Amino acid sequence: MIQIASSDNIFTRLLFSAITNSEIKVTFMQNNSVQKAFSENLYDLYLLPSLEITHTNNLFVSQKIGIAFDGFLSPDFIYYSQSENLKKMNLIGDYSMNEVILPKVVFREVFAKEIEIEIEKNINPNENLIVCGNSNFKQNKFEKGDSLSELISNYLEAPYLKYIFVSKSKEPIVKINQFAEIVAEMEFDDIAKNKYFLEFSENELDIIKSEWNSIYFRLTDLEIDSFDEFRKIPFYYGLVDEMKEIAFI
């Protein structure tokens, strides 16, 4: 049996709703817990935010299955309250290295604005916020925000590969890749019947369905090439000393 540690949000749940197999056991957890499990090598395979592998060498990454975005749907949204004087954003929720690094780069390169990212525990409605995770999908909150994934994908001019399957050995990647064609044929109407989605409003499900074609679970060279470029960002900005070696399978 392959033991998988996965980030926990609507999109990772959608993916694993299609991957059901007696040889696979998935444990969903917060991003920081997935990263801790990954650093301690507690599981066989990990579905985690793509920049969380920045400090680890000799990894295997699936080039067939992951989660990429190029439209409004996103795990993370920006809510502006002081957009006329944008200097700082407070980061709350189930954040990862992606949300700590990429917004600063995108705002610098696209809008010529230097912003600071500060991690907060509580929501202050008078501050600019980046809210990460499922809390965006409570009471239709996300409709009032700007999609961080859309902003990043526009900057990359390619889909933004947010979640990747990664392992420290080759065999689990080979195993998960066997589900590539099943993932490619996912239909939202079938997956939305899963009990996990009963808590979502009809309006939320309608929006997700309308944006379904902007989410990619079956990866192509476009998503992989895009990821291979933006994972260099921490190196270019002096956040890591060297590029780590990974092997796409």
Image (tube, grey):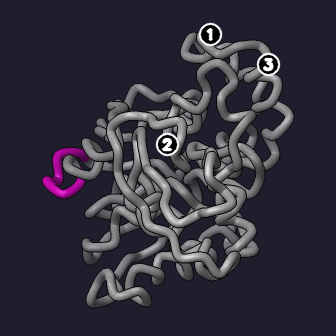
Q: Position of residue 169 (x, y in %)?
A: 28, 63
**57 above or below 139?**
below
Could you tell me if residue 174 is visible in this image? no
Query: What residue is pinned by disc 2?
Result: 132
Query: What residue is pinned by disc 3?
Result: 203
Determine whether, in the image, residue 242 is placed left or right of residue 111: left
Could you tell me if residue 177 is visible in this image? yes
| Residue 165 drawn in magenta | no
Q: Amino acid at mark 1?
A: Leu
Determine whether, in the image, residue 204 is placed left or right of residue 161: right
**237 above or below 8?**
below
Label 2: how many residues lie within 10 Å, few (<14), some (14-19) or many (20+)? many
Q: Position of residue 65 (x, y in %)?
A: 57, 54
Label 3: how many residues lie within 10 Å, few (<14), some (14-19) or many (20+)? few
Disc 1 on helix, strand or loop? Answer: helix
- First of labels 1, 3 by sequence position: 1
Determine whether, in the image, residue 149 is placed left or right of residue 94: right
Q: Nearer the viewer, residue 113 or 218?
A: 113
Disc 2 on helix, strand or loop? Answer: strand
Q: Nearer the viewer, residue 230 or 138?
A: 138
Q: Amino acid at mark 2?
A: Cys
